[in-house]
Structure formats: C-alpha cells, structure tokens
Amino acid sequence: MRNKHASPGTRLPSLDLLKGFEAAARLLSFTKAGEELYLTQSAVSRQVQELESQLGVALFQRRHRALVLTDAGQQLHAAAAQVLATVRAATERLRAQAGTRTLSVTSTPGFASLWLIPRLAGFSRSHPDVDVRISAEVRIQDLARDGMDVAIRYCPRAMAGADAVRLFGERVFPVCSPKLLRERPHPLKAPSDLSHHVLLHVDDPEGRWPWQSWRPWLEAAGVPDLKPAGSLRFSGYDQVIPAAIAGHGVALGRSPLTDRAIGSGELVVPFDASAGSERAYWIVTSRHATTRPEVTGFVAWLKAEAAGEETKPDVKPAGKFRARRRAA
C-alpha cells in the first residue's frame, strides 16, 4: 500500500525496476538482461523507461544496436548493484536463522545435466534438510552479486581464482551410438572415417568457445582438413550428447562428463585418439558462504565424487585404431 503522505520525490523505485536496470546496465543490453531475468527484451526496456520516468533523468543513451550509460545511469548502477547484493546477503542470513537451509549452485549446462544432476541424489540422501538450487548457465555469475553460494567453473587455472579447488581435468575423444560403429559400408575404425559421418557441434558462430570445437581434436588426430558428411549444431553441450546417444552423429566426448553414458553402453568410443585440455573444473565458494555447514558439506561431497573420477581407468576404445599424435 502506498504512503499517501509520500511525495513522488521521496518514493523509492521498486525492487523489480532496480533489478531490471542493474542487469541492463551491467550487460549493456536489454536483450541479454531479459535472458538473465527470464523476461522479454521489451519488458526490460519498459522497466527502464518507468524508472527513468520516476527519477526524471535519462539512464541510458540508446544508440544503434548499443546502450551507453549516462552519468546518472553510472551513479545509479553503482548504488543499485550494492543494494541488491546487500539484500541478497541479508535474505540468505534470515533464511538460515529461520531454519531454511538453501544451497545455491551455478555451473555450465553441460556439467549440470551430464555430471552433477545424475549424482545429486547422493548428496540429498545424506543432507535431506538442504534445499539445493541449481542455476545452469554459460555466463560466469558473480557469486556475491547474484546470491550464489558455490560455482563449478570450467576454465584454465589462471581464470579460476586463487581460492578455487580443482575437481578434475578432462580428456576429449569422439563418441557415438553403438549402431554407428557397426554401420556399413562406412564403419568407424580410424579418424579419417569421420568423413563419412555427421559431426555434432556446439553452435558458436562468433568463436566464443573455441575449446568446444572439433578443430583441436582433428589436428591432434592428424586429420586437420577432414570434411564430414554433414553437421548438426546445437545451442549447448547438454543437447549434443543426447543427440549422439540417439544416433544422429558423432560427438566429442568429454571425460568424465560422458563416462556414465559410455559405461552404460549408450555411447561407445570408436578409436583411441584422445586429446588433453588446459581447462579443468573448479569449485569456487562465495566468501559469504564459506562457514555455512551445508556449503562445506556440499564442497566435501563434490571433492569425494571427483576423487573417484580421477582414479577411474581410461575409457577403452571399441575399435583397434590408436592415434599417432596426442595433445598434451
């Protein structure tokens, strides 16, 4: 209910308007802010317009395909980011005091769907009083600003942060449905045989994720100029692997993310031609959450699960080919 004695000059903007503005100011895009907040681009634009109307100042310069903060916008962004971070931290403290133990975890969609979620029941059985909330995004979230407790990040060591804890590295190799391995007249016996098959890709027209490309593996396997029979592209790695299981083509498997599907027989490794990666998976804990028992318990559980991955034997190829070249 509005305070009838409050003048327009003393009323504070609503939290929703500040959230929309803060996201747009940080990303300099109404579209990207909408994706983050699960709103349409026009909804975020209307929120910003309403906020500008209430304040009586312009917060953005709207240029062709670009947003630029005005001086007023820069001032409000700094204040809004601090306010939202403070409210999120206070909310978590109050929930903890009320006995609601909530654990917020962010990771990539591929890690969440292929590795974390299939194992999560084990943590829930031993911690039934903890409400785990998973946020699967390619975007690297700011833990304090976004109210997250733990991040599992896929990156080189230099980008992980001084306090990051290594989970495991990865190996990359082709995987496919067993029926493709037996396909005639073009069975998969050597890397050059991929020229007769469809390759599955993560769609990356702007080259933002070169480590997800087939190119490094093809170079390591000695077939850098290979032309496949066709290509299928998907918006995320969490879609590529189900497509491989369904027999739509050959994907780049990433151990240990694909180890379960290989162990179950849903996927096979046609030949031994794996490439290493400079990237690894790292645990990063918010400085506001390091002493909470549900957070320390979750991190300990992750480390125990990861230790089991590091001691697994190498995945054996179904074929007889052994690559002459390996990436270090």
Image (tube, rainbow, N blue to C red):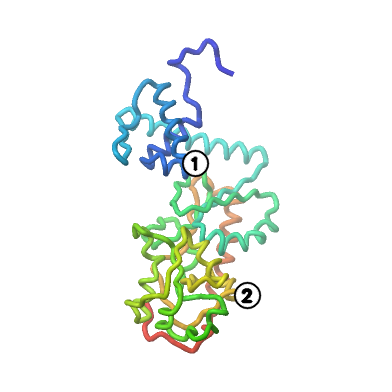
How packed mark 1 is, by other alpha carbons closer than 10 Å (few <14, some 14-19, many 20 or more), is few
Q: CA distance from mark 2 to mark 1?
A: 37 Å
**Which quadrant of the view contains residue 115?**
bottom right
Residue under label 1:
37
Q: Position of residue 59 (x, y in %)?
A: 35, 29
Mark 2, Cα crowd under 10 Å, few <14 / some 14-19 / many 20+, is few
Given residues 82 and 6, the one toward you in this image is 6
Q: Residue at x 62, y 75 (%)?
A: 264
The amino acid at mark 1 is Leu
Where is residue 162? Give x, y as percent: 40, 56
Quarter of the picture containing the N terminus is: top right
Residue 270, image x, y percentages: 50, 82
What kind of element bears circle 1? helix
Which residue, given by chain and number where applicable, does mark 2 sit on? 264
Q: Is residue 251 above or below residue 281?
A: below
Query: In this figure, what is the number of numbered marks?
Result: 2
Q: Residue at x 34, y 57 (%)?
A: 206
For this rendering, which residue is in front, 200 or 283?
A: 200
Determine the residue located farthest toward the top in the rendered image.
Answer: 5
User: Which of these two is toward me, 220 or 189?
Assistant: 189
Q: Is residue 165 visible?
A: no
Q: Is residue 132 above or below residue 13?
A: below
Please tell me in which quadrant of the rendered image residue 211 appears. Answer: bottom left
Quadrant location of the C terminus?
Answer: bottom left
Per the image, label 2 sits on a secondary structure element best described as loop
Pointer 2 or 1: first along the chain: 1
Residue 192 rendering spot, x and y as whole percentages: 40, 83
Apparent side of residue 271 relative to residue 158 in the rendered image (left or right): right
For the point 44% across and 46% down, the residue is 142
Residue displayed at 36% across by 83% down: 325
Q: Is residue 107 visible?
A: yes
